[in-house]
Image (cartoon, helix red, strand yellow):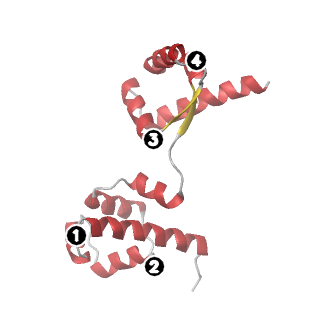
């Protein structure tokens, strides 16, 4: 039998611990949670997920998170320590010519007028999702627009 990398096992254990904590907050036993799942697993399988002993697919993670009413993204961010934040240059955003970013361009221009000394801001994944909705874009497209707008500005500054 091939032994998985220690880092992989540690991530699985942290993910399992987060799932177990979410289940316990709801006051559910393993059999009670399994009964709520749209997929057929045993409570022993759930226990092996929670202990980190058994790995599972993304689809299974989404099923577990849906039943627990927790965000899979938040769960992953907790175990990796990475947040879906984007650092944005308001000046670059105000100068953007992308039509889809018009609502954000207006906001950036107005906020620079109020506070011209602070160019960079950090947008959480939730803020990016809200901005995307305002602009009629997907969150992934908005994230890409914001990252490219700021990175283009950084390249121009360094030249």
Residue where numbered disc 3 is placed? 125
Mark earlier in primary sequence (1, 2) = 1
Camera-side residue of 57 and 13: 13
Residue where numbered disc 2 is placed? 53
Q: Nearer the viewer, mark 1 or mark 4?
A: 4
Residue at mark 2 to residue at mark 3: CA–CA distance: 30 Å
Camera-side residue of 4 and 31: 31
Residue at the image position 58 percent from the left and 15 percent from the top: 95
Q: Residues within 10 Å of mark 1 (few under 14, many from 20)?
A: few
Q: Say whether residue 45 is left or right of residue 53.
A: left
Residue at mark 3 to residue at mark 4: CA–CA distance: 24 Å
Where, by quadrant of the figure, is residue 23 drawn?
Answer: bottom left
Mark earlier in primary sequence (3, 1) = 1
Residue at the image position 69 percent from the left and 28 percent from the top: 154
Residue at mark 1 to residue at mark 4: CA–CA distance: 50 Å
Residue where numbered disc 4 is placed? 116
Where disc 1 sits, the SS reads loop
The x, y position of residue 146, in whole percent, is 54, 30
Q: Are marks 1 and 4 in contact (CB under 8 Å)?
A: no
Where disc 4 sits, the SS reads loop
Where disc 3 sits, the SS reads helix
Q: Nearer the viewer, mark 4 or mark 2?
A: 4
Where, by quadrant of the figure, is residue 147 drawn?
Answer: top right
Q: Quadrant of the C terminus?
A: top right
Residue where numbered disc 1 is placed? 27
Q: Residues within 10 Å of mark 3 (few under 14, many from 20)?
A: some
């Amino acid at each position: 039998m091939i032994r998985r990398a220690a880092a992989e096992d540690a991530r699985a254990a942290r993910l399992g611990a987060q799932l177990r904590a979410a289940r316990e907050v709801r006051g559910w036993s393993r059999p009670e949670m399994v009964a709520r799942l749209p997929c057929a697993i045993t409570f022993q399988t759930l226990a092996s997920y929670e202990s980190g002993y058994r790995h599972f697919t993304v689809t299974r993670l989404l099923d577990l998170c849906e039943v627990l009413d927790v965000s899979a993204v938040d769960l992953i961010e907790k175990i990796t320590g990475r947040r879906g934040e984007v650092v944005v240059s308001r000046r670059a955003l105000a100068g953007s010519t992308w039509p889809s970013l018009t609502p954000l361009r207006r906001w950036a221009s107005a906020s620079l007028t109020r506070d011209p000394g602070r160019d960079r801001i950090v947008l959480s994944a939730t803020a990016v999702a809200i901005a995307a909705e305002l602009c009629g874009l997907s969150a992934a497209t908005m994230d890409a627009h914001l990252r490219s707008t700021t990175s283009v500005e950084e390249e121009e500054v360094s030249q």
